[in-house]
Image (cartoon, rainbow, N blue to C red):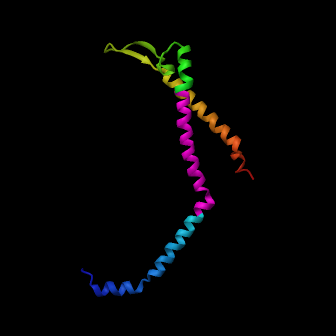
Amino acid sequence: MPVSKKSVRKIATKVKPVAIAKVGGNQLKAFMEFIRTQGVIGLAVGLVLGGAVGVLVKSLVDNVVMPPLGLLMGSAEGLKGLTWTMGTTAAGKPATLQYGIFLNDFINFVVIALVIYALVRLLKVDKLDKK
């Protein structure tokens, strides 16, 4: 069933553009108030900085901490080079357990957790939610 231009004009005259703008304006004001009161900006900044701290600490651990530890444990590649050969597979290839990679990732996790803990304590953010 085709719609005529006359019926479209009739409907268009009933809907006031000003009313639509007011509804949009109220929604925008409510949204901006939500952003301010709920701390969304602080959360976004925290996520970005947390990601940056994670990358920085991972680089510190991988490039500064791990090479001397690996050298002490007998690996020229740092901890990532530590493996244990358990035997050979049916195809004749060595079955190796790469425990050095796990140790590296575990140390990364511990250092990142300690850095975040120290920042939270230093900035006294842990006391914000307590009333």
Q: In the rendered image, which quarter contains the N terminus? A: bottom left
User: Outermost residue toward the front?
Assistant: 64
* Relative image position of residue 127 (x, y in whole percent): 72, 47
Image height of 48 relative to 26, above or below: above
User: Outermost residue toward the right?
Assistant: 131
Residue found 64% across the figure and 34% down from its top: 114
The count of marks equals 0
Direction from residue 14 to residue 47 in the image, left or right: right
For the stretch drawn in magenta, what is the main secondary structure?
helix
Image height of 100 relative to 108, above or below: above
* Relative image position of residue 129 (x, y in whole percent): 70, 51
Residue found 53% across the figure and 15% down from its top: 71
| Residue 48: in magenta span | yes
Along the line of sight, the residue nearer the viewer: 117 or 8: 117
Image height of 128 relative to 77, above or below: below
Direction from residue 81 to residue 61 in the image, left or right: right
* Relative image position of residue 28 (x, y in whole percent): 53, 69
Along the line of sight, the residue nearer the viewer: 2 or 119: 119
Along the line of sight, the residue nearer the viewer: 42 or 109: 42
Residue found 58% across the figure and 51% down from its top: 43
| Residue 53: in magenta span | yes
Residue found 54% across the figure and 41% down from its top: 52
The residue range painted magenta reads 34-62
* Relative image position of residue 27 (x, y in whole percent): 53, 70
- Locate residue 31: give its quadrant: bottom right
